[in-house]
Amino acid sequence: MAWKKGDARAFEEIVNMTMKNAYAIALGFVGNVEDARDLSQEAFMAAHRGRESFDTDRPFFPWFYRILRNRCLNFIRSRSSRGEISMDVLVEKECPRPQPDGVLMKKEDSEALWKALFGLSEEHREIIVLRSFHDLSYRELSEALDISEGTVMSRLFYARKALYDILRDRFERRCAEKDE
Amino acid sequence: MDCNRMEHDGMRYIDGEMTPEQAIEFERHLADCRTCRRSIGELGRIDALAGRMRIRDPMDSFWEGYWKSIYRRGERRTAWILVIAGVIATALFGLVEIGRNFGPVTFVKVSAAVLAAGLLLLLLSVVRERIHQKKTDRYRDIIR
C-alpha cells in the first residue's frame, strides 16, 4: 500500500474516500459541526503518523475508527468542546424503514432525537449512532467496539431503553394524539 | 422488566438478526409475555425513529478545504515541534552557560533563567494534570 510508504497522494485518496463517514461519526460523539470537523481531521493526521502500525491485510476504516473514537473520547473528557450541540443535523434516509403505529415523523422529532442522544452516556450514544444512522450489523459493531456480540445486544438494549426514557413523554403524547 | 429475553432476543428481533424460525419462536413468546410485548413496542419505536435517520452531509463548500486543512495541520505540528525544541535547546544552553561561568548578571542570563523557569513550570503543570486525569479518567480502560 503506497500510503504506508508515506505517499501523500495515496493518503489524500484515503481521506477523500472516508472523510464523510469520519465526520459523521465524530459528530455523533461531540454533537458540534466544527468540533467534529476538527476531530476528524486530527484523527486523519494521527492515522498518517501511525500508519506503520496499520495492517494492510485488514480494512482501513475499523483501524481508523479506533483512532477517531479515542480522539473524540479524549476531547469530551478534556471538556474543551464548544459546548453547543449543532441542530438541523439529522435527515431522513433515502429509503427509510416502514414505521410502526404511533411513530409519525416530524422535523421536531428528529431534533428531539438528536438532543436526547446527548442525554445518553457516550457509550450508549455511540452504539445507537453506529447501529441506527450507519446501519452497522452486530458483527461490525462487535469489531468496531471490540466487544462480543452478546455485549453489543446488551448495550443496545440499555441504550435504547435510556433513549426511550428520555423521549417517553413525546411518544406517549404522540400516541394520545393518534387515539384522539 | 422481569423477563430476561428482551436483552438479547428482543434486540435481535428488532434488528432483524434472527432467522425466520427464531423470529417465529420469539413471536410465540411475545404472545404470552406482556413484559416483552410492552418492551418491544417501546424499544421498537426508538429503533423505528432512529433507524430512519442519518447525519446530514454538509454542503460541498464544507469539504473543499478539508484536505488542505489536514495538510496545514501537519505543517503546523511540525513547526511547533521545531519551535519547542529550539526553545528548550536555547534555555538549556543558557543554563549550562550560567553554570559554567556565572559572572555578572546580564540580560541574556536573566532571559535564559526566566525561560527555563517557565518551561519547568509548564512541565510540572502538565505532569500534575496528567496524574489527576489518570486518577479520575472514566475512560482509563480504553487503549489510546
Image (cartoon, coloured by chain):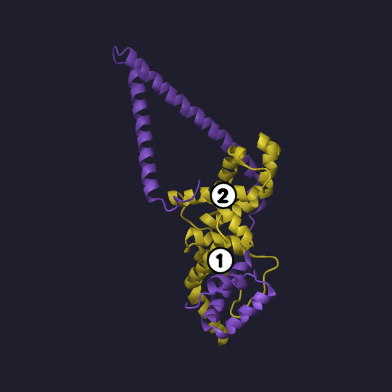
Chain colours: A yellow, B purple
CA neighbours of label 1 inside 10 A, class few (<14), some (14 to 19), many (20+): many
Which residue sits at x=54%, y=79%? B36
Where is residue B20? Give x, y as percent: 69, 75
Marked residue chain, label 2: A
Q: Is residue A166 above or below residue B127?
A: below
Query: Disc number at residue A17?
Result: none
- Position of B73 with respect to B113 (left or right) is right
Where is residue B24? Give x, y as percent: 66, 79
Q: Nearer the viewer, mark 2 or mark 1?
A: 1
Where is residue B85? Give x, y as percent: 47, 27
In this view of the protein, which residue sits in the foreground, B118 or A128? A128
* Among numbered discs 2 and 1, the one appearing first in the sequence: 2
Which residue sits at x=45%, y=52%? B139
At label 2, the amino acid type is Arg
Q: Are marks 2 and 1 on the same chain?
A: yes
In this view of the protein, which residue sits in the foreground, A158 or B62? A158
Per the image, label 1 sits on a secondary structure element best described as: helix
CA neighbours of label 2 inside 10 A, class few (<14), some (14 to 19), many (20+): some
Per the image, label 2 sits on a secondary structure element best described as: helix
At label 1, the amino acid type is Met
* Residue identifier under label 2: A66
Q: Is residue A89 above or below residue B26?
A: above
Marked residue chain, label 1: A
Q: Is residue A64 above or below residue A175?
A: above
Which quarter of the figure has residue A111?
bottom right
Q: Is residue A165 above or below residue A124?
A: below
Q: Is residue A88 visible?
A: no
* Residue identifier under label 1: A153
In three-dimensional space, the C-alpha distance between marks 2 and 1, rounded to whole angstroms, equals: 20 Å
Which residue sits at x=53%, y=30%? B79
Where is residue A91? Give x, y as percent: 63, 64
